[in-house]
Image: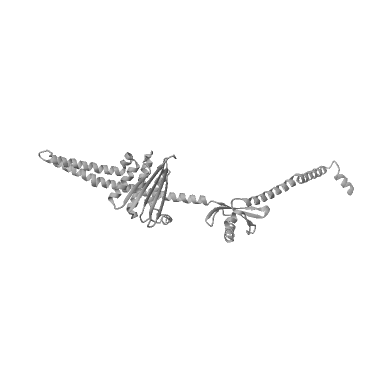
Amino acid sequence: MKPDHIFDIFFSLENPAMYALVFITMILILVFLIKREFIHPLTVRKRKLEFENAKLAALYSEVDPDPVIRIDNTWKLIDMNNSAKNIFGSDKNSIAILINKFKENLNDQSNNIVKIKENFYTSTIKEIEELEFKHIYLHDITLRINYEEKIKNYQDNLKMLRTKVDTVNEEEKKKLGKELHDSVGHSISLLKLDLQNILDSENISISRNEFKEIFHSMDELAKEVRDISHELKPPILYEFGLLAAIQSLVDRINNKTSIQGYVTYNTKFRIEYQDIELQIYRICQEALNNIEKHSCCSEFNIDFYFKDNFLQISISDNGNGFDIESDYEMKVPSLGLLNMKERAESFGGTFEIDSIINMGTTINLEFNFNEK
């Protein structure tokens, strides 16, 4: 068969391969046109937008209020924004340590909190491929860390207070049991013995003197029970108010010891809420116990200032004082002080203490009864 004859047969309209070739050619042309007219411009536009976004991100980092550090792909420092410069200044060593930390732990984001000087920061790294550099973003969480530390300290203090309260409750139960057994129980036994002797006598008659003795024993028994009851719940507080109750505590110390105490106030007042009155009474009672036992002072003052439903209390002595900072740094503050602080704050009050060695201690309390 001649070549020109083969060519005529192939391009003949009766040849199916001819139609297949034309169809494939048309498909290829269509794909080329779509790619050139639609896909390629979209790709170019996408790359342009990504580049513009990368530039915007780079520009935004300059005015970001949080510190941002820019490094190249070899982990070398390129630049820092103003916030980072304010933190690091010319301290390149700290920056190098931070960058190396990211380089060594690139795939470990389990702990992204870093400490720089005295502050704590969360840190993240973001690569900007279009501009061939990376950003290290820092966010200051020092305030949050400090709050968490305070919460932890409060929780530890509350655990200590709970243990203290349980211990004090047990001690008070033992004290009450001992008082009832040794004092009240003994008086009842004597009274019972006197009555038993009268009943056992052949001639049951009570002389006037015997009757007076029995009556006296019963009077002493009632007094002992009343004293125990007053210790548990001071009636003077509810009958005459906080000032009278505090004055009675001070009078007891004045009569019992060589320490002289004074109560001053700008005006007489009554607190509407009895539970708050009781808490303030217990705080003052705890403070006076500390003064009596530990202060070695010659005198103390309790000053009340009440105006417009706002109460300020100052309890001061001229005793030996103590080092407050050392006490709290050891994280073993006086449980008595913690108890007073928790009592005040549980009712929205504030508690502050100031002490100077060999000069005395002052406790300041404030309560605003206008606040719910």
Q: How is the image coloured?
A: one colour
In the rendering, at what x and y percent does residue 344 appear? 40, 45
Can you name the residue that lies furthest to the left here?
202
162 displayed left or right of 113:
left
Q: Viewer-proximal residue, 266 or 346? A: 266
Residue extending furthest front? 266
- The reply, left or right, for residue 298 in relation to residue 190 is right
Give the residue at x 39% y 48%.
314
Residue 85 placement: quadrant: bottom right
Please name the residue shown 81% across and 43% down the image: 22
Residue at the image position 25 percent from the left and 45 percent from the top: 180
Q: Position of residue 215 (x, y in %)?
A: 18, 40
Query: Do we see residue 192 in this rendering?
Result: yes
Q: What is the quadrant of the C terminus in the image?
A: top left
Task: Tell me: residue 369, above or below residue 115.
Answer: above
Q: Count the labels in the image.
A: 0
Residue 106 can be seen in this image: no
Q: With respect to residue 278, does 79 lie above or below?
A: below
Q: Looking at the picture, how far across and down is residue 162, in whole percent? A: 38, 48
Using the image, determine if residue 364 lies above or below residue 103.
Answer: above
> Front-most of 30 and 73?
73
The x, y position of residue 69, in whole percent, is 61, 55
